[in-house]
Every structure is written in structure tokens, then in C-alpha cells.
Amino acid sequence: MKSFVYLAVLLVLFLSSVSTSKEKQIKKEETIEKRVKNLLSKMTLEEKIGQMTQVTIETMAKQHGTATQHFEYDINKMKDAIVKYHVGSILNVYDVALSVDYWHKLITQIQDIATKETRLKIPILYGIDAIHGANYTTGATLFPQAINMAATFNSDLVKKEGEITALEVRASGIPWNFYPVLDLGRQQLWPRLWETYGEDVYLDSKMGESYIEGAQGDDISDKDKVAVCLKHYVGYSFPISGKDRTPAWISERMMQEYFLPPFEKAIEAGAQTVMVNSSEVNGIPGHSNYHLLTEVLRGQMKFKGLVVSDWQDIERLYTRDKVADSPEEAVRMAVMAGVDMSMVPLDFSFYNYLLKLVKEGKVPESRIDESVSRILRVKMMLGLFENPYPDENLKSQFASKQSDKINLQASEESIVLAKNDGNILPLSKNAKILVTGPTANMLSVLNSGWTITWQGNEESLYPKDKPTVLKAIQEKINSANVKYVEGTSFDSEINIEEAVKAAKDVDDIIVCLGEHAYCETPGNINDLTLDAAQLKLAHALIKTGKPVILVMIEGRPRVINSIVDGAKGILLAFLPGMNGGEAISNILFGDANPSARLSVTYPKFPDDLVHYDYKPIEAAEGNQFDPQWPFGYGLSYTTFNYSNLKLDKNEIKKGEKIKISVDVKNTGNRKSKDAVLLYLNDEYASVSRPVKQLKRFSKIELNPGETKTVEFTLDDYDLSFIGRQDKRIVEPGKFKVFVGDLSSEFTLLK
Ligand code: BGC
């Protein structure tokens, strides 16, 4: 009885704390609304349009930053932008990462001008691409790229990445991060594939939510939180040609079922800003798409925050897409479609055109007020009016040892073991090893784009204290037992014969292949097959008869089927980040046990780009699903046994939930993590359904011999799909669930 009273008191206290924090939140929002209205009423048209203008820091440069010289700003140009043009936002670096101290100097100067030398003292909203950590601040904690983070199937790690990145970005004095990328990675050729959380809708949505939780916390005005920016809304990631910024054709049903849900969930998770698709969908450039930017984003998804354009993309409606017949018309189109802020970013043309358009009555001032309110609201939510300056106290937490440790864990959990014939891995630490290949001795290849520079390929700027794969192996085992021969560059032979000769005296050969660092359009390719020179190196080494371990370091799954059979072991490391060298070496020599699963389907052939959630017709009447490895695939150094798949009901009614449980046992002799994945198939439906779709996952850790029961709950949304009328529906019928090699069925009643 006593304990019952105690529990009841606790419950009341808990509920009242929830309601007071909710009440507080509502009050805060009401206050912000009043402040926004009040400030807006004092603004001139010029000041309003200035808020909608975002320029790059390059426009205020005295000196360009390069590998050998530091960026420096020009205070007069800065004043011009902030005082004369009233700009509301600045972005980027020019062109290399800055130190925390220089960021402090820069942001302090910017905010000094904005809050001391302008009439209304509105702080600047500085934005940056901190894609895998604070990649434009030197020495930051740089995580694996998103394609890897998704492969961890560990949403806690993604949340941690969000927390650490937010702290380090804020420690640099910046409150706004153009991240997460929620584009669905369903075009393997696309050079931005690695910026995505992979090909699956649920995994993308879940990782996006977790990142936002970590980055924004409960309140983005907290000193170590930032506002996230969801990008690139929407459909950018599915270019038919595979080239960056080329057309996508996406039906309404496909848009609603695949590409929109990750954005929808992220908005529910509290995202306040969205960046627009730089390309076009169904012939309509993203920045002129009223349907997607206003009807869907504002109407259907109830988004209240601010929409920022992508780089120069309003102007491109005229110069590139030719849907506007003048630069002025391009500005009118974009603003009327729903864009609130223009990343112009190299001049003040947007400001001048928009001012003219409003004065001539071609854009109503009410539309301007709407956008400016959204921008001011985000600035207020971030607490910039109270304190726009960098926080000196956060510096001490920047790139901490603890963050580095979490980063190493993320890296280890993100590398997929795809093949391990005869348990060739892990290798003995006493073995004699040959290390070869173009990705063996570079840090840039482990990180790729958005690392220190946009393309991430300035090897000389990488930290000297982080090991490449080669160096990490040399540090781990007796370095006298490690031979290194380059073999090839990315696309041409260097000394393959020398590598073959060196192979004679070793026990095992580690061949590190893959891609150089790249980002966006410069990363376009014409063929997904790995470069011929690299394949030649692998073939020559396989021919020696010595065991070959392939380590693939790449941003997208380059086709390697001609060397898969000959290799004894294969690690798909993709882009494991700044600790990638150490993580790969830890896995190769057994100091870490792989637990990653592929976040994209790895194709066997360059023209067979099918996804794991294919339709029945894709495996019927002579067709077959035949990838190299499917999404969700990944081995471990231990073995697991799945048993006892149980459903709490065989039949459910609409609105009811179903609980599913499964026992997972570690049947090997190593402690290990396992990603338990639950898939669903709707057996018969009015629109053809995928053979299976991921609906839940859980990452668990098991000691040898240990068993854990994993429980999942599915609801109506998980059973729903976009029906013939292009609306989300749930249809009665039979559903099949799959976990590991087990499956079971239940029925949704009429
Ligand atoms: C990219 C965006 C990025 C922006 C600002 C564009 O080229 O598409 O993802 O946020 O540049 O750097």
C-alpha cells in the first residue's frame, strides 16, 4: 500500500512536470509570436527584404583561405552587407576550415555590426554545412558519413553525433547547421549517395529523428544546441542519369511513399528550417514548385519554419532551368512558390529585384511579412536576440577525448563485414602483411567531401595525429611485418608488379580500393564499375594464391563482382570518418567485432540497380533480384541464433497495435553487437507492395551464450501505404513479418 501511494505521488509529480514544461513551451511560443509581430511592425521594406537575403562570407573577404594562407575578412564589405543591405544571414567558409578562435573573432565582429550598428539590432543567423561533425572548424570530431552512420543501425550513436556536432558547431559560434540530409539514397550512382542515410524510408526517417533529437535537444536556445536544416526538399536524390543536379521523375504516389516521409517525421521531431532541392522533379525546378513548397510542406506537413534556397538556385531558374525569362522573374517565382530566404549568395541581386517587385506590386508585402516572421521566429527560438555571441566556455568541450571515443565506436559499428571465407578474419597480429591500393594511405578518402574543404581532398590539411589504414596497421602490429606498395592510383597503374613481388614474403594481403574524396557534381561518374586499374591490382594479387582481404573505401557501392570470388575477406568500409583508419585496423585484427549492416543494396552489375524492397514483378517470370549484397546484410565474428518469433495476436482490428518478440542468442565465442531487423510484407493489396520493408530495428549487445528477447510494436502507420487515389490508406488482409530467418503472419480484420 505504502509503495502504491509512493508510486502515485511520483506519477502525479511526473505528469505535472510534463504539463508545466508543456505550458512553459506554449508560453514561450506565445511570447515569441508577440515579439515577432512587434518587431515586424517596426521594419521598413528594405529591412524586411534584407532579412530574406543570405550571402556567403566570400562576399566579405579580404583574403581567400587556402592550404597556405588564412582567410581574412574585410570589415567594410561586411558593413556593406549588414548595414546597407540589412542581410539576415551569412554562410559558409572561404574556402578552408577556420580555427575555433578565428570563428569567434569572425562571428563576434559580424554580431557587433548587426547589433550595434543597425537600426533594429537584429542578430545575424550564421549557417554552415556541418555534415559529419563540425567539418569547417579545424580539429573537430569528424564522424563517419551518413551512409555509414545508417549502417550502424544504432540510433543512439546518431543522436550522440547530433549532440557532439551541435556542441562543436555552437562552440564555433554558429547556431545553424545545414543538416541532416534526408534525401533517400535510391540512386547508387549519385555522387551525394554517401550524404544520405541509405535507401530505406524507415531507416532514413529514424536516423533523421535521432540526429535532430541530439542536435536540437528540448530547446534550441540551449547554449550547446543548434537549429537543424532538412535538405534537400524534395526528390533531389533520384536523378535518372545518376548525375548530380539532373532531372528526377517521381510520381505523386512514389513521392508520398518514399521521399516525403523522412521530412514529415523530421518536422514532427521539431525541425525549424528546410533547404530546397537544387534540381527538378517532373520538369518543375525545386525552387519554383508551389505544390511541394507550399501545398505539401505547409498544408499537408504543417511546417511553420523557414525555407532557405540552395546555393544560387533562384537565379538558376533563369540561367539554367529557363522557366523564368529574366532574373527578376526568377525571384518572383521562387518567393511566390514558398521560398523565404535566398542563398543568393555572391551578390545582392535578390535584394534589389525583390525590392523592385514589391514596389511594383508584383509580390504582395504580406508574402514578405510571412517569410520575415518565419526568419525572425527562428532567430528568437535560438536565443540570438539575448545572446548572439560565441560562448567562450564551450571551447573546453570542443573535440574532447570522450567525443573521439564515441566517434571511434561509430566508425567500428559502421563498417560492414561482407565476406569471411574460412574465418580468415580477424588476422593474427603475428602475421606478415602486405598493404596496398590507392585508399591505404590517405585520410581524405576515409572522410570524403565536406571535410576541411568542400571537396575534402586537400590531404595536406588533414590532422597529423590521425592514422591512415596503413599507419594504424603499422601501429597495431610489429611494423617490421608490414610491407606497403602503392600498386595503383585511383585510375592508373603505379607498380602492380612490385606489389605482386612483395606478396611472396607475406601471409596475407590487404588491398584497399575505392574512391578519391569528392562531393556534389565533381563526383559524377559514367560507370559504377570500379576503375580498371584497381581491379587489375586485385586480380594480380588474387592470382598469387595468398589470401586477399579487400577493404572498400568509397562513397557509393562501386561494382567489384569480378574480384569478389577471389577475395577471402571483404570489408565494406564506405566513409568511416577521421577514426576510420583505426577502426578498420581494429576490425582486421580482431580488436573490434563488426556489427554493421548495409544501408544500401550493393549491386553486382552496373545496370542492375534494384533495391531490397523490390516489387514481386522484379523477381517473377525470368526476372531476379541478384545484388552483390542486399540492404541489411552484414556478418560478424560471432554467430547468432534467432528463435521464438512470437506475435501477441494473430488478428488485429484497425487502430490496434501488434507486439512482436524474438529471442536472439549469441552462439559464438565473442561478445558482440547485433542489429535485429524486423521486416513486413503486405501479402495482397490494391497497389503492388514491396516483397518486404524494414519497419523496426534494434541494436543489442550479447555476451557469448547470452540470449536476449527483443520486442517490437507495430501500428496502423506501419501497415499503411499510398493507395490508388494517392492517399495513405490501410487495407485489411494478411501481413507477414520477418526477423532473421524466421517469419510469421497476422491478419488485419475488416
Ligand atoms: C549544397 C547544399 C549546401 C549548400 C551550402 C550547396 O551546393 O547543395 O547541400 O548546404 O551548398 O554550402
Image (cartoon, rainbow, N blue to C red):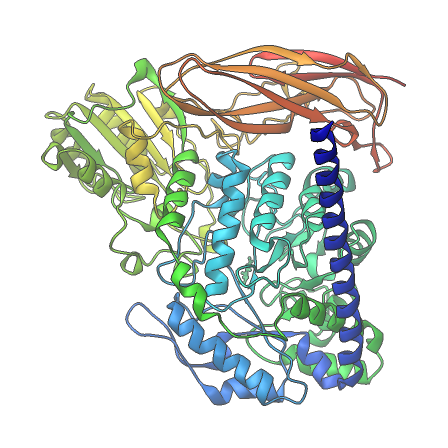
- 573 in relation to 169, above or below: above
When asked about the image quadrant of residue 677, the answer is: top right
- 199 in relation to 278, above or below: above
Q: Residue furthest top?
A: 644
Tell whether 362 sits left or right of 246: right
Which residue is at the front of the view, 595 or 319? 595
Picture coordinates of residue 64, whole percent (x, y): 38, 76
Which residue is at the front of the view, 371 or 637? 637
Tell whether 622 sits left or right of 722: left
Tell whether 697 sits left or right of 748: left
When asked about the image quadrant of residue 494, the answer is: top left
Picture coordinates of residue 106, whole percent (x, y): 45, 77
Q: Residue at x 77, y 38 (%)?
A: 253
- 718 in relation to 645, above or below: below
The image quadrant in which ligand 1 is located: bottom right
Q: Residue furthest right?
A: 750
